[in-house]
Image: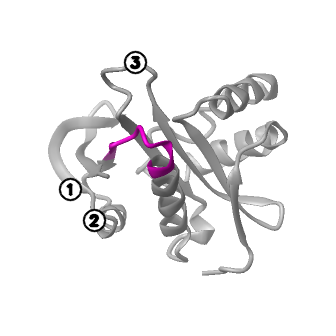
Amino acid sequence: MLQNDLKIARALKEDAGDLLEYLNLIGGESDNLLFGANEFHMSIAEEEAFIEEVSNSAASALFVAKIGSEIVSVANIAATPRKRLAHQATIGISVKQAYWNLGIATAMMQEIINFAKATKVIEIISLEVNATNTTAMHLYKKFGFVAIGRYDNFFKFSDDYYADAILMNLYL
């Protein structure tokens, strides 16, 4: 990986435009995401408000990884403030296709886990992964995630093409 060039930080309001551009691009690079190409129709002001809301949360975060000024990866962790569910959070990680297999997802996962541990509230990190995405499942297992179930037909790509999701948890 480009260890010295990669900079991971919490997203800032100033990142809103570049984040929207990144998300609309990567949605078309893979069937492993929860969205497709150009499916983010938020305005920059709406994205700025979202970033600010996440930034004000003690148990949620949005991280961007940049090489120079280019966003190459985004990761989020979100926990609910509801007391009975506050101990669990969901995550998502994406990496631009040109930067796959360089260790960037590993670095982002470590950032998420460090954040979760630092909250002293989050005890479980949950995710859904496309059942055909063996590369991602290998990453998650490397960090200690365990499969807890399967969600049939979780992803719908067309009227006759579905993919299952593997539900995974990491118990901190």
Label 2: few (<14), some or many (≥20) within 10 Å? some
**Front tag of 2 and 3:** 3
Residue picked out by circle 1: 146
At label 1, which amino acid type do we have?
Val
21 or 172: nearer the viewer: 172
Identified at 25% across, 49% down, the residue is 168
Is the residue under label 3 in contact with that under label 2 (CB below 8 Å)? no
Residue at numbered disc 3: 82
Q: At 71% across and 45% down in the image, what residue appears?
A: 11
**Which residues lie in the magenta part?**
117-128
Tell me where residue 152 sits by quadrant.
top left
Q: CA distance from mark 2 to mark 3?
A: 28 Å
Q: Is residue 13 magenta?
A: no
Quadrant of image for the N terminus: bottom right
Q: Is residue 161 above or below residue 100?
A: above
Q: Which mark is residue 141?
A: 2
In the depicted view, which residue is nearer to us: 154 or 64? 64
User: Which residue type carries mark 2?
Assistant: Lys
From mark 1 to mark 3, how far is it between C-alphas? 25 Å
Sequence-first disc among 2 and 1: 2
Is label 2 in contact with label 1 (beta carbons under 8 Å)? Answer: yes
